[in-house]
Amino acid sequence: MPVLRRRPASPKASATRVIVSDTSPYRSRTLTVETDGQTTVAYLRDLRETVLGAVWIANHQAAARSVDLARLSAGLPPNMPSAGTSDPAGRPELDAAALEVVWFEEGDGAAVLEDGEPICVIPVWSDIHRGIPGYSRDATTQSPFAFPLADEMAELGPRIKQARAFWHWRADESAWAGFQQSVLGHLLDRLGPGGHYWHDVGRQWRGGATPLPMVGVSERPPQPGRGYSVLSTIGMGAQRMPTVELYEDQVSPFARIELAVATTLPSQRAGSVFPWLAQYPWRAVTWFAPGDVVKWYHQAETFPLNSPAPAGDPATAASSGPPASRWEGVLLLEEPSRLSGPVAPGLSGFTFGGDPVKWLWLVPITDEERLYAKAQGSEALVRRLAQQGRSWVVGG
């Protein structure tokens, strides 16, 4: 499990103290449990210290009949009125040694356990700006400060257990190797023998730190009947992507992905596109879905999927095709054969954690095309690219 870390209380609430502070394994969220001796609350924050979700946990003094508005105005944790708590007399303050933070596999929410039992949960749909709090064991009615945890334990209880099991699995030294070998075996069956393998391609994005996920890239060189290489990530599918449940009723079909690109460009250069994308969902706390468009983070001329500039005089270069450095992002396609080019190899059939793993193929696009997709929808962009004869094989 992640190590508990303390941090100073913020100046805005100097009368409070932090009991527990824990950062998600993806380094994208922080959960703190804070108290001023009268009441205890938990906060979910992003890296900018913006509060995203919050939940009242317990009163430590006899509850009043109404909310103390003066406390709220002073930036202090709210007290729960007597009608909203299972312990109106107040309970003893929490002991940090008895508390454990369990992050969900996606890294977008967390639970706090006391002696192994959940006392609060802040899921991804908790939104302080929309007045949606997290769930508390001691809450008996819905309020702006907490929803009753008992009402959702049928769903959240198993999820907490699954999260603990997931992090226990990740802590096993053999876990990554087992997943890696399973995916390599799947690619061998679908794409033939492997070539070069790049280990931990997200390292350069981490500034020396080592948060999850770990992702490698496998090259499948051209072979008879296939005149292009396929580069595929290995590792993204080992954990569910964040925030899917905010948009999809059925999470499982969309939760896990790997990325692939078919290319005739040098594999070393084309593979350089993956460090940017390999940890993107967990770093940005979002998800990749079929049809998504993603903008390159740097200058267009540095985009790895651009072809080198043609040699010769400017007139020759201009007549040889579109200019170099035209691509500034990617379109993610589950069915690349909707565009021109050879029939795409099928990579479906791999599952992990009970979920299917989708392979999404990278198709480079211009910034104008990206903006078109944003305005008209990705389906409109796919139709336009198909009409133009755009190939899904990069450089082909």
Image (tube, rainbow, N blue to C red):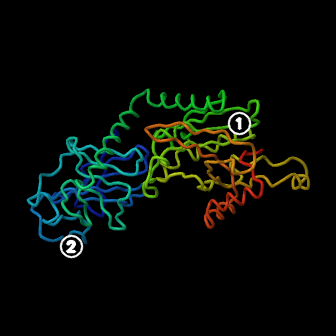
The answer to whether 192 is drawn above or below residue 66 in the figure is above
Q: Secondary structure at mark 1?
A: strand
Q: Which part of the image, by quadrant, shows the C terminus?
A: top right
Identify the secondary structure beneath mark 2.
helix
Q: Nearer the viewer, residue 282 or 352?
A: 352
Return the residue nearer the eye: 38 or 360: 360
Q: Position of residue 45 (x, y in %)?
A: 37, 56
Which residue in the protein does label 2 denote? 69
Q: As displayed, is residue 356 above or below residue 30?
A: above
Q: Position of residue 307 (x, y in %)?
A: 76, 47
Q: Quadrant of residue 133?
A: bottom left
Amino acid type, label 1:
Ser
| Residue 342 appears left or right of 219 | right
The residue drawn where x is 35% and y is 34% is 168
First in sequence: mark 1 vs mark 2 = 2
The image position of residue 205, as x and y in percent, is 54, 44
Cα distance between the residues tagged 1 and 2: 64 Å
Residue shown at 36% from the left, 68% from the top: 130
Q: How many labels, in total?
A: 2
For label 1, the crowd category at 10 Å Cα-Cα, with few meaning under 14, some 14 to 19 and many 20 or more, is many
Cβ–Cβ below 8 Å for labels 1 and 2? no
- The residue that label 1 is drawn on is 229
With 107 as the anchor, is 371 left or right in this view? right
Query: Which tag is nearer the camera, tag 1 or tag 2?
Result: 1
How far across and down, in percent of the image, does residue 339 sit?
A: 71, 51
State which quadrant residue 171 falls in: top left
Residue type at numbered disc 2: Leu
